[in-house]
């Protein structure tokens, strides 16, 4: 029997707005007014409020006095915190994944993911490259098989994706990312957890420093 998942209006609006924010169709710092959203979705204020509440709980929307709800505006301090926290969580996911009994399947999926990254990069399809790059980390969370770790990472990884989309025009480090993913895979294959964790930390440190420098030069 196929399980039918019923969703409320609030759920649907939340999903649409979440994707709009993460993709940066709704920009960082942009206000979310009830009136405009009611007109867009042709609904009452109740499902809009429900959606905004969930987005706020996820850390994608903030409430500002005398302003109302607005998409988070990511500053330099936020960038540092996001990258550093992602490094901690992804390193934990990596360790759990490497201890998973389905280790061979983990390696197989990561190898295929890297092949997809290579194909995307060689065909200059940067959008697909980024999707496969994100998937590399998603695979680690899948095999980490730790629901609490996944829940803790969901919000910060959403903010991380906002960063990559917001600054996509100045981020040009695909070759480095691919090289580091390959290095990670080799450490995983050798079952060297500490080395793999060290590579993961360096992976995020390099990405953070690259972005901060690119922003500085862009300004």
Image (cartoon, rainbow, N blue to C red):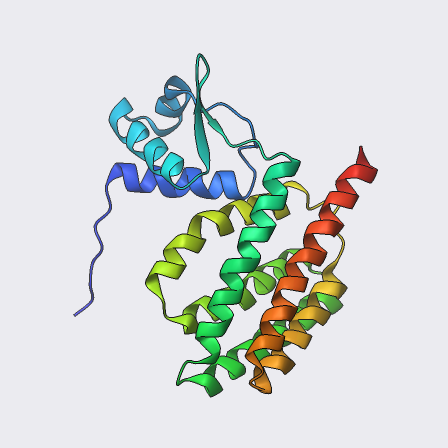
Pinpoint residue 105: horizontal percent, then vertical percent: 46, 84
Pinpoint residue 118: horizontal percent, then vertical percent: 69, 72
The quadrant of the picture occupied by the C terminus is top right
Where residue 15 sits, quadrant-wise, is top left
On the rendered structure, is 42 left or right of 109?
Answer: left
Above or below residue 105? Residue 89 is above
At a point 57% along the width and 58% down the height, the residue shown is: 87
On the rendered structure, is 162 left or right of 50?
Answer: right
Given residues 171 and 205, the one toward you in this image is: 205
- The single residue placed furthest to the right in the displayed view is 217
* Residue 123 shows in this picture: no
- The single residue placed furthest to the top in the displayed view is 66
Pinpoint residue 153: horizontal percent, then vertical percent: 44, 54
Where residue 23 sits, quadrant-wise, is top right
Q: Tally the marks.
A: 0
Above or below residue 39? Residue 6 is below
At a point 51% along the width and 71% down the height, the residue shown is: 94
* Residue 69 shows in this picture: yes
At a point 68% along the width and 76% down the height, the residue shown is: 183
- The single residue placed furthest to the left in the displayed view is 1
- The single residue placed furthest to the front in the displayed view is 194
On the rendered structure, is 142 left or right of 83?
Answer: left
At a point 35% along the width and 23% down the height, the residue shown is: 38
Pinpoint residue 168: horizontal percent, then vertical percent: 68, 46
Given residues 155 and 205, the one toward you in this image is: 205
Given residues 38 and 167, the one toward you in this image is: 167
The quadrant of the picture occupied by the N terminus is bottom left
């Amino acid at each position: 029997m196929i399980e039918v998942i019923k969703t409320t209006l609030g759920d649907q609006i939340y999903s649409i707005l979440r994707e709009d924010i993460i993709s940066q169709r709704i920009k960082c710092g942009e206000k979310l007014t009830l009136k405009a959203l009611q007109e867009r979705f042709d609904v009452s204020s109740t499902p809009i409020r429900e959606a905004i509440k969930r987005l706020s709980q996820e850390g994608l929307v903030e409430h500002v006095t005398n302003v109302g709800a607005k998409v988070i505006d990511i500053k330099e301090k936020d960038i540092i915190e996001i990258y550093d926290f992602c490094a901690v969580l992804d390193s934990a996911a990596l360790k759990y994944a490497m201890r998973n009994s389905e280790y061979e399947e983990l390696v197989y999926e990561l190898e295929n993911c890297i092949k997809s990254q290579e194909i995307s990069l060689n065909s200059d399809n940067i959008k697909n490259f980024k999707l496969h790059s994100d998937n590399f980390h998603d695979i680690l969370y899948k095999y980490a098989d730790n629901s609490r770790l996944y829940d803790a990472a969901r919000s910060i990884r959403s903010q991380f994706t906002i960063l990559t989309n917001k600054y996509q025009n100045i981020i040009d480090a695909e070759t480095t990312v691919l090289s580091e993913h390959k290095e990670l895979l080799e450490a995983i294959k050798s079952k060297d957890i500490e080395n793999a964790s060290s590579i993961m930390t360096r992976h995020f440190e390099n990405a953070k420093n690259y972005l901060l420098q690119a922003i500085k030069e862009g300004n």
